[in-house]
């Protein structure tokens, strides 16, 4: 593992090869000098030029020839000595070169310099991903599918090597190093003007905390999304202004609480925050009633708190029960039927297998289903490598921390307006969410849609912005949501949220809503609709056609002729 502070590999190589190179220089010098001193035929010695020329091709074993004249016996004796000296010198030098090439420090220096050059060549927006575990792989795959670049830092060389085996569209520079060091973050492009965000996704909370602090101090304008397993580290991150802290277990507990009292809002949330290219399968909603939880670890604790907030009774099974008021405890691990029966599994409506062992969780779920086939089963999957086993069981909900973190990261990075919209959804009643969800699913189905946000300013929507500022025109939202190829057809997209700088925010705006310059829109729909909408707000001719149905002439000549015809008429 190599620190980011590195020297040029050329200088490193020269320093390591100093003795062999000096040896070669001395051998060449002595050989040339000896040839100029040794008497030749007729007592005439060789010049320095001819001696250097002869040694150059003889000592390097390129060839041999007695020039400009046949050598004398003294010269041949000296040449024989020079050949043996050169062979020894070159053998020493080549052995040193091979040893240098196999040296881990030198290899790390070469990789570091190659990585630095690769990052410097990136002239497009990219995200800095710290940690290429299960979560990092999911994030990188999704970013690559969305056409976004990424730079990866990973401490494990095996994981870093896996990145090169995956079929990414764009090259992802990766370096095996400690991402918690500020110098390494700088090397990876933290302070680059193209860096759009930092994702601290390592499995070490302290490393993620260090990354968050470095980002806050070195690049305060860049958003940092940090993974935190413990509440203490999350509170520490929040204390110095980390914008987005993702606690996977607390996030799922929040989802579960939402599903218990507002199932339609929960389904809307999972549909909008799913990974592109996947399909959401709507299962039955978690029922209210008595629940059983196996494993009172970090995950179990936050779930019990969520059950308590929703006033749902829960019986806790754990090897070391912490007796306390308000809950019924059973000592055990839950893998045996007798323990589950003591927890009254037959009268329960749901069970959570939340231990840190995947095999134990599957055993608990299988045994519980045999005792009560109608149970709502929530399974915790610790290792994504076991997903085939969990898929075969067909639980109602499988909690995969890596997927929760990846989905949250992508939602925050790619669609920043999604978070305030979801907060507004949670504040509405479930009937409103059901009405919105039914309308969206009827149009787009359960495939995870494309969700994007756009600011209607001169940078991101130049044609629309100039139209609004120049004409003081009134443009309805429904006028923009038309197909630019056939304005009679609606665009395969819907507006979910309209954000204005004057705090006049509109949830699910109607088609009659008037658009203002500077508005920010959150839209959902097909991928093709996103491209069509971008064409509408970027291109003046397309915008005029969508708004009025007129096809403006293209090119200076046709525009001039069109203006003349309008004047004559």
Image: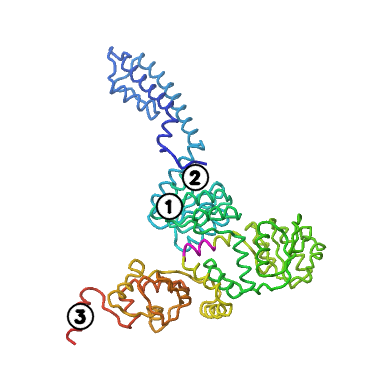
Indicate left or right for 405 with 60 as reference.
right
Q: CA distance from mark 1 to mark 2?
A: 14 Å
Q: Nearer the viewer, residue 29 or 1?
A: 1
Query: Which corner quadrant of the image does residue 486 belong to?
Result: bottom left
Q: Nearer the viewer, residue 306 or 541?
A: 306
Q: Please state the horizontal and vertical placement of residue 84, each as a whole percent of the image.
A: 44, 21
Q: Please state the horizontal and vertical placement of residue 295, each as a whole percent of the image.
A: 72, 59
Q: Please state the horizontal and vertical placement of residue 64, each as a whole percent of the image.
A: 37, 26
Magenta-drawn stretch, dominant element (helix, strand or loop): helix
CB atoms of marks 1 and 2 within 8 Å = no
Crowd around label 3: few <14 · some 14–19 · many ≥20 (10 Å): few
Res. 181 mark:
2
Query: Which corner quadrant of the image does residue 270 belong to?
Result: bottom right
Q: Nearer the viewer, residue 400 or 300?
A: 300
Q: Is residue 111 above or below residue 99?
A: below
Question: What's the magenta region?
Answer: 407-415
Looking at the rendered image, the quarter that the C terminus falls into is bottom left
Residue 413 lies within the magenta run: yes
Could you tell which of marks 3 and 1 lies nearer the N-terminus?
A: 1
Residue closest to the far top: 43
Res. 563 mark:
3
CB atoms of marks 3 and 1 within 8 Å = no
Indicate left or right for 74 with 365 as reference.
left
Res. 25 mark:
none
| Res 530 seen here | no
Could you tell which of marks 1 and 2 lies nearer the N-terminus?
A: 2
Res. 219 mark:
1
- Mark 1 vs mark 2: give the one in front: 1
């Amino acid at each position: 593992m190599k620190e980011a502070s590195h020297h040029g590999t050329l200088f490193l190589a020269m320093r390591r090869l100093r003795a062999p190179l000096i040896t070669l220089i001395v051998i060449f010098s002595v050989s040339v000098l000896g040839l100029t001193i040794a008497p030749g035929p007729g007592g005439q010695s060789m010049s320095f030029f001819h001696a250097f020329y002869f040694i150059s091709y003889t000592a390097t074993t390129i060839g041999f020839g007695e020039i400009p004249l046949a050598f004398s016996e003294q010269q041949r004796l000296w040449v024989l000595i020079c050949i043996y000296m050169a062979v020894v010198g070159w053998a020493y030098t080549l052995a040193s070169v091979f040893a240098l090439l196999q040296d881990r420090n030198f290899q790390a220096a070469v990789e570091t310099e190659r990585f630095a050059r690769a990052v410097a060549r990136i002239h497009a927006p990219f995200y800095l991903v710290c940690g290429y575990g299960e979560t990092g792989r999911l994030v990188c795959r999704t970013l690559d599918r969305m056409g976004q670049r990424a730079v990866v830092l990973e401490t494990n060389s095996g994981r870093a090597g896996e990145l090169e085996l995956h079929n990414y569209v764009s090259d992802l520079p990766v370096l095996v190093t400690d991402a918690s060091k500020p110098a390494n973050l700088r090397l990876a492009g933290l302070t680059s003007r193209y860096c759009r965000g930092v994702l601290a996704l390592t499995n070490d909370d302290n490393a993620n905390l260090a990354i968050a602090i470095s980002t806050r101090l070195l690049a305060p304008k860049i958003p940092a999304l940090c993974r935190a397993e413990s509440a203490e580290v999350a509170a520490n991150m929040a204390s110095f202004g980390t914008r987005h802290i993702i606690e996977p277990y607390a996030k799922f507990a929040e989802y579960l609480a939402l599903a218990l009292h507002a199932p339609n809002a929960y389904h809307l949330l999972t549909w909008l925050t799913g990974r592109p290219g996947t399909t959401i399968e709507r299962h039955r909603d978690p029922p209210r009633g008595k629940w059983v939880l196996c494993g009172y670890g970090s995950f179990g604790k936050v779930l019990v708190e969520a059950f308590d907030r929703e006033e749902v009774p829960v019986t806790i099974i754990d090897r070391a029960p912490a007796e306390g008021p308000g809950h019924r405890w059973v000592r055990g691990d839950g893998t045996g039927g007798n323990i589950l029966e003591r927890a009254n599994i037959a009268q329960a409506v749901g069970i959570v297998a939340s231990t840190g062992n995947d095999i134990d969780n599957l055993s608990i779920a299988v045994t519980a289903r045999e005792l009560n086939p109608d149970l709502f089963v929530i399974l915790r999957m610790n290792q994504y490598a076991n997903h085939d086993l969990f898929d075969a069981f067909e639980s109602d909900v499988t909690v995969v921390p890596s997927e929760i973190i990846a989905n949250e990261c992508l939602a925050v990075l790619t669609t920043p307006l999604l978070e305030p919209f979801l907060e507004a959804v949670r504040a509405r009643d479930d009937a409103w969410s059901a009405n919105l969800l039914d309308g969206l699913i009827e149009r787009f189905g359960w495939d995870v849609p494309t969700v994007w946000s756009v600011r209607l300013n001169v940078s991101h929507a130049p044609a629309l912005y100039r139209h609004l500022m120049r004409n003081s025109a009134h443009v309805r939202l429904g006028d923009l949501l038309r197909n630019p190829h056939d304005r009679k057809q609606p665009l395969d997209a819907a507006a979910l949220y309209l954000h204005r700088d004057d705090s006049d925010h509109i949830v699910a705006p109607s088609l009659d809503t008037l658009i203002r310059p500077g508005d920010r829109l959150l839209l959902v729909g097909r991928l093709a609709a996103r491209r069509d909408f971008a064409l509408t707000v970027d291109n003046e001719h397309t915008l005029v056609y969508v708004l009025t149905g007129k096809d403006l002439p293209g090119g200076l000549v046709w525009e001039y002729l069109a203006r003349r015809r309008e004047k004559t008429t």
